[in-house]
Image: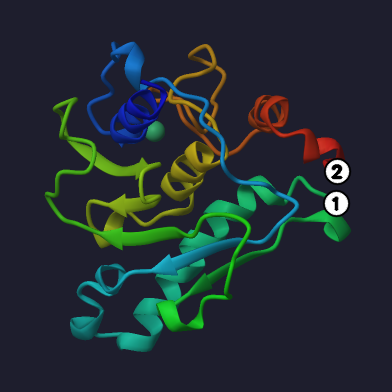
Amino acid sequence: MRSFLIAIGLFLVCGCSSTQHPDLRPSVFRTSALYLDLRHPVYMLADKSLWLGCDKDPAGDDICRALRVKQINEGVQQWFDYFDKADRPEVAIFFSEEELPSNPKNRVIHLGIDPGGECGKEKLGGSYVACYRHKIPEIVFDGSSRITPRIMAHEFGHALGRDDNDVPEGTGSVMSYKTPTNVLPLDIEIMCRLHFECRMVK
Ligand SMILES: [Zn+2]
């Protein structure tokens, strides 16, 4: 029975950024599942789909890829900039599975693009710009234009255990659907209730 419940949990957890801002979400989608340990490096793996369209980019393939990585990094750093430099969690993006360090302590987060894909649409309907799934885990953008620091910061918030709209609207939290801004001190405070290692935060 227990393993069955765990399997269900893994299947149904999906955090999403939405352009349609559904206000009512089934409670099953609310989760504080936590698997990143900030004392250990956070590794991400760029799936081939993350480079979708870069071969046709007038700026060139390399610049296109570098720009996407920059946006992703900026989204993650919105969270980690709050840490003292000496204690800031290490983040690395890898471009092939072979490059990954063996036996990482944290599960590797995959990054990809799936235009018009099923990520986030499976159970909820609506038009989503990106989503996060615990199961793999992965962050999937609906298109290259969706790779922005804010959207990345929101999805990465799920990887840190945060839920959609887990704070009152109007606070400007990065996890808000209606009025998201960037990662705020309030976001860090809530995240730190889930991570004891947050004592390192300023
Ligand atoms: Zn979300």
Examine the rendered structure and indicate whether residue 95 appears above or below residue 124.
below
Q: Is residue 103 left or right of residue 131?
A: right
Q: What percent of the width, then of the height, locates residue 2? A: 41, 23
For the point 34% across and 22% down, the residue is 29
Q: Is residue 62 left or right of residue 12?
A: right
Q: Give the residue type at disc 2.
A: Met
Q: Give the residue type at disc 1.
A: Asp
Q: Quadrant of ligand 1?
A: top left
Res. 22 image quadrant: top left
Determine if the C-beta at disc 1 is less than 8 A from ligand 1: no
Res. 127 image quadrant: top left
Q: How far apart in space, not on screen, are marks 1 and 2 (Cα)?
A: 7 Å
Quarter of the picture holding the N terminus: top left
Q: What percent of the width, then of the height, locates residue 142? A: 22, 51
Instruction: Compare residues 96 and 167 and report the one nearer the observer.
Output: 96
Examine the rendered structure and indicate whether residue 82 appears above or below residue 170.
below
Callout 1–callout 2 Cβ contact below 8 Å: yes
Q: Which residue is mark 1?
A: 84
How busy is the neighbourhood of tag 2: few (under 14 within 10 Å), some, or many (20 plus)?
Answer: some
How busy is the neighbourhood of tag 1: few (under 14 within 10 Å), some, or many (20 plus)?
Answer: few
Res. 164 image quadrant: top left
For the point 14% across and 27% down, the residue is 125
Instruction: Compare residues 132 and 103 and report the one nearer the observer.
Output: 103
Quarter of the picture holding the C terminus: top right
Q: What percent of the width, then of the height, locates residue 25? A: 29, 15
Determine if the C-beta at disc 2 is less than 8 A from ligand 1: no
For the point 25% across and 33% down, the residue is 19
Q: Which residue is mark 2?
A: 200
Q: What percent of the width, then of the height, locates residue 31? A: 45, 23
Element marked by disc 1: loop
Q: Nearer the viewer, mark 1 or mark 2?
A: 2
